[in-house]
Image: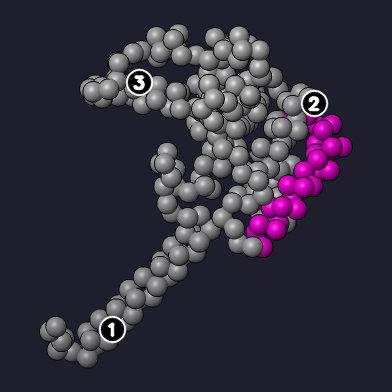
């Protein structure tokens, strides 16, 4: 390194170097803190960590409620909507703030009478478990439910999935990839049949064919038997 001829220039360079180092240190600490709160890793579906997926899931639950009822969710389904929303909120909220955050999410989505009289008591077990997992520094807090389980519990149909982002099944995900590939003019995979969305749904839409009715079993039992390989 060539040193400056004048002391004043050397002093300016030294100050500039110290400022750059301090800026880099602050950026590093901010990045590390963010990564500790929200892990910067992508799952199988490309989402940056469980927290990112949880946020998208909360938006999907709101969308689903408006799609079905064009207003607040009916009293008969308030429990399941609030419980699934509470599970997702537990992943991105401090347990002390979880009840208030859930109430804030429920405004305009859940029946006001349920929020005022029943929601707090119904979610007590979830609040307690989320607090325990938070203290133990577990990555997943409270309960964890997979996408398939949420879809089955809420009975999300293929038509409703068209308006959602993460609460979609494997078939809907493949259809979106195929539609995007066709829109961008890319070739189909060698194993792909190149079917349109409508053609594929006609052949594979279980929500319409309802094979569990022919077997005289419930929908949940059908998927459980299919997963275990007994069907």
Measure the alpha-carbon separation of dots 3 and 2: 37 Å
**Pointer 2 or 1: first along the chain:** 1
**Pointer 1 or 3: first along the chain:** 1
Part of the protein shown in magenta: 110-135
Q: Residue furthest left?
A: 2
Q: 75 left or right of 1?
A: right
> Residue 178 falls in which quadrant of the image?
top left
Q: Nearer the viewer, mark 2 or mark 1?
A: 2
Is 117 drawn above or below residue 199 in the view shown?
below
* Between 16 and 124, the one nearer to me in the picture: 124
Label 1 belongs to which residue? Answer: 14
Q: How crowded is mark 1: few (under 14 residues within 10 Å), some or many (20 or more)?
A: few
Label 3 belongs to which residue? Answer: 179
Measure the alpha-carbon separation of dots 2 and 1: 68 Å
- Residue 117 on image: x %, y %: 87, 37
Q: Residue at x 82, y 33 (%)?
A: 114
Question: In this orientation, does residue 46 appear?
Answer: yes
Check disc 1 and report its element: helix, strand or loop.
helix
Taken as a whole, is the magenta stretch helix, strand or loop?
helix
How is colour applied across the structure in the image? one colour
Q: 137 left or right of 8?
A: right
Label 2 belongs to which residue? Answer: 75
Question: In this orientation, does residue 104 appear?
Answer: no
Check disc 3 and report its element: helix, strand or loop.
helix
Q: How crowded is mark 2: few (under 14 residues within 10 Å), some or many (20 or more)?
A: few
Q: Which residue is drawn at 77% across and 43% down?
A: 123
Which quadrant of the figure contains the N terminus? bottom left
Mark 1 and mark 2 in contact (Cβ < 8 Å)? no
Is 25 drawn above or below residue 63 in the view shown?
below
Is 222 drawn above or below residue 93 in the view shown?
above
Check disc 2 and report its element: helix, strand or loop.
helix
- Indicate yes or no whether the magenta region holds residue 149: no
């Amino acid at each position: 390194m060539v040193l400056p001829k004048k002391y004043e220039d050397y002093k300016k360079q030294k100050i500039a170097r110290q400022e750059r180092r301090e800026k880099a240190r602050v950026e590093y600490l901010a990045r590390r803190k963010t990564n500790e709160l929200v892990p910067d890793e992508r799952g199988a579906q490309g989402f940056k960590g469980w927290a990112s997926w949880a946020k998208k899931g909360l938006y999907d639950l709101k969308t689903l409620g408006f799609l079905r009822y064009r207003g607040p969710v009916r009293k008969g389904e308030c429990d399941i909507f609030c419980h699934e929303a509470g599970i997702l909120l537990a992943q991105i909220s401090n347990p002390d703030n979880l009840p208030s955050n859930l109430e804030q999410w429920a405004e305009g989505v859940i029946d006001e009478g349920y929020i005022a009289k029943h929601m707090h008591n119904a979610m007590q077990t979830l609040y307690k478990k989320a607090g325990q997992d938070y203290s133990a520094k577990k990555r997943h807090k409270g309960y964890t439910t997979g996408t398939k389980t949420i879809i089955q519990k809420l009975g999300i149909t293929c038509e409703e999935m068209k308006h959602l982002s993460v609460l979609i099944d494997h078939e809907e995900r493949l259809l979106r990839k195929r539609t995007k590939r066709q829109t961008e003019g890319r070739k189909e995979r060698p194993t792909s049949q190149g079917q349109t969305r409508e053609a594929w749904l006609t052949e594979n839409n279980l929500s319409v064919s309802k094979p569990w009715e022919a077997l005289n079993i419930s929908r949940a039992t059908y998927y459980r038997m299919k997963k275990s390989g007994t069907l």
